[in-house]
């Protein structure tokens, strides 16, 4: 069995890493299918959502664009299509089985592993289990237990697996997750396998109400919902549709922070998207390690007190790497907010107007994200500021994968994110451009320099120093 966990992500993403952690040891592939707009046209409330997903580096990312239709089944249709997109990717990745998961869904890994063994041993083509549902806090479990099921591990068979609201499906379940065939179906008993559903444990409960396919149909007083939810204590009446339930206090099985149950906690969201958290991959890039080794050789007599600027630094992982290794580094990124004093959210040209004393200029995967006119402005400014001992190191995507033209403007869709503006250059074109104001110390164009998941694009690495033979700076 090669098993893919296919995550459906729009909101409650604060739970995503916790959910992945609960099952990552018992699945083979993680696929995250996300959307920036809900199935009802609501934009995602957090502007750094997509950037955060990129830096999370938790699995294969796919973006889904909902097709909003005037139908009471709009939500179900889009959810099914979104999940099917993930299943197609899993099939392409060689997976034989899949599991649909949402951000607020968790499994005990030992129960999961035993259930997986049962499915393999009996060659079950489909399975489902019951669930526990939680309200406001990870320790507040609803009682009595709910009686519907969630589909669990199912076979993934090209030409055979069909996603539809099959009326003959063996158990009551979410129609957007039902799939056939289910000829050898396994229904797990509650004592053998449970999905822990933290459906009402989230930072923004209103987003759930506005975008849930069932709740969306009801005209709610959202202010009243928020007030009642925030003030809830065990023994109080719960908000719709949970009025008939009560609370049982249980263990926090997955160590979910209490602040996830504080709706509209804006200070949390600022921290969530900007702090260097343990669940965001902070290892340095391969280019950072390469650059550090070069810098040590180049500045071997004057290594102490070097000042460096990381242009387009993203979440700052290379900034922290260089700083931890003795280089005073400042990161600049116009799109990524970070509370570290060493990372500035600012346009690079404006920053260079203010800060002009750098020994090292560093840019990874930034040059291909800006128009050529801005690149020319940046190169001119750097060349004017560089001293005779300064160097400029950069890594950028090559046009070689797209016909090896001198330059190619494209709306590039990579393994993560939506389509993004890219302008790709050939090695020869860049070398000629750089020769106006720089002298090339090192250049390489190759694959294997910046692999990501299943992708291994051709990239160009270049190291430059100031061209002292140029009478005037060219643009």
Image: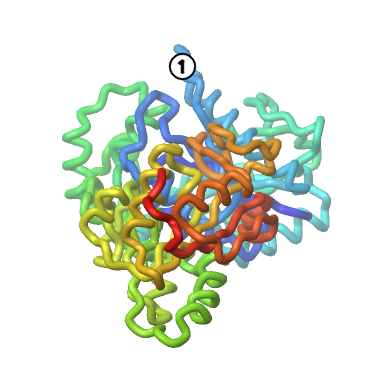
User: Is residue 95 something one can see in this rendering?
Assistant: yes
Residue 243, horizontal then vertical, whole percent: 30, 39
| Res 244 → quadrant | top left
Number of marks:
1
Q: Nearer the viewer, residue 101 or 384?
A: 384
Q: Residue furthest top?
A: 70
Q: Quadrant of residue 466?
A: bottom left
Identify the residue at horizontal 40%, vertical 73% (top origin).
Answer: 389
> In this view, which residue lies farthest toward the bottom?
301
From the viewer's perspective, is 103 left or right of 455? left
Q: Is residue 337 left or right of residue 76?
A: left
Q: Residue at x 60, y 54 (%)?
A: 460
Residue in view at x 31 percent, y 38 percent? 45
The residue at the point 78 percent across, 55 percent down is 1
Position in image of residue 206 (x %, y %):
28, 37
Closer to us: 155 or 393:
393
Crowd rating for badge 1 (residues with CA inside 10 Å; few <14, some 14–19, many 20+)? few
Task: Specify whether 126 is left or right of 7.
Answer: right
Q: Which residue is mark 1?
A: 72
Element on which disc 1 rests: loop
On screen, 104 above or below 248?
A: above
Nearer to me, 387 or 457? 387
Of residues 290 and 176, the one nearer the viewer is 290
Question: Which color scheme is applied?
Answer: rainbow
- Residue 169: image location, x then y, percent: 68, 31
Residue 90 drawn at (x, y percent) = 70, 44
Rendered view: 427 above or below 22: above
* Image quarter in which the C terminus is found: top left
Q: Is residue 272 visible?
A: no
């Amino acid at each position: 069995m090669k098993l893919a966990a296919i995550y459906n992500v729009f909101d409650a993403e604060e739970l995503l890493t916790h959910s992945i952690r609960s099952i990552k040891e018992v699945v083979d592939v993680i696929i995250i299918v996300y959307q920036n707009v809900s199935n009802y046209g609501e934009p995602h409330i957090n502007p750094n959502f997509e950037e955060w997903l990129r830096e999370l580096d938790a699995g294969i990312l796919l973006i889904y664009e909902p097709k909003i239709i005037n139908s009471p089944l709009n939500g179900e249709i889009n959810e099914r299509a979104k999940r099917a997109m993930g299943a197609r990717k899993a099939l392409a990745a060689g997976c034989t089985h899949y599991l649909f998961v949402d951000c607020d869904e968790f499994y005990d890994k030992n129960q999961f592993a035993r259930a997986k063994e049962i499915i393999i041993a009996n060659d079950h083509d489909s399975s489902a289990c019951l669930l526990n549902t939680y309200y406001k806090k990870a320790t507040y479990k609803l009682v009595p237990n709910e009686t519907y099921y969630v589909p669990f591990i199912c076979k993934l068979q090209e030409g055979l697996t069909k996603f539809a609201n099959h009326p003959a499906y063996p158990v009551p379940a979410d129609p957007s997750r039902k799939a056939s065939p289910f000829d050898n179906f396994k229904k797990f008993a509650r004592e053998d396998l449970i999905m822990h559903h933290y459906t009402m444990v989230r930072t923004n409960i209103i987003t759930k109400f506005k975008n849930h396919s069932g709740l969306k149909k009801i005209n709610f007083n959202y202010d009243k919902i928020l007030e009642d939810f925030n003030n809830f204590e065990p023994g109080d009446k719960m908000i719709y549709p949970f009025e008939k339930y009560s609370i049982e206090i249980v263990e926090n099985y997955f160590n979910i922070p209490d602040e996830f149950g504080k709706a509209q906690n804006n200070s949390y969201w600022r921290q969530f998207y900007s702090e260097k958290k343990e669940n965001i991959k902070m290892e340095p890039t391969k280019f950072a390690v390469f650059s550090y080794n070069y810098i040590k050789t180049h500045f071997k007599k004057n290594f102490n007190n070097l000042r460096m600027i990381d242009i387009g630094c993203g979440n700052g992982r290379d900034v922290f790497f260089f700083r931890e290794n003795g280089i005073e580094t400042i990161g600049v990124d116009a799109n990524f907010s970070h509370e570290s004093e060493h990372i500035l959210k600012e346009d690079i040209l404006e920053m260079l107007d203010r800060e002009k004393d750098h020994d090292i200029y560093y840019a990874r995967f930034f040059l291909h994200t800006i128009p050529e006119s801005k690149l020319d402005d940046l190169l001119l400014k750097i060349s004017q500021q560089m001293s005779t001992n300064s160097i400029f190191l950069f890594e950028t995507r090559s046009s070689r994968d797209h016909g090896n033209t001198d330059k190619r403007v494209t709306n590039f869709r990579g393994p993560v994110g939506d389509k993004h503006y890219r302008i790709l250059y050939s090695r020869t074109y860049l070398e000629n451009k750089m020769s106006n104001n720089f002298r090339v110390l090192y250049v390489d164009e190759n694959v294997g320099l910046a692999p990501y998941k299943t992708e291994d694009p051709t990239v160009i690495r270049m190291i430059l120093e100031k061209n002292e033979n140029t009478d005037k700076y060219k643009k």
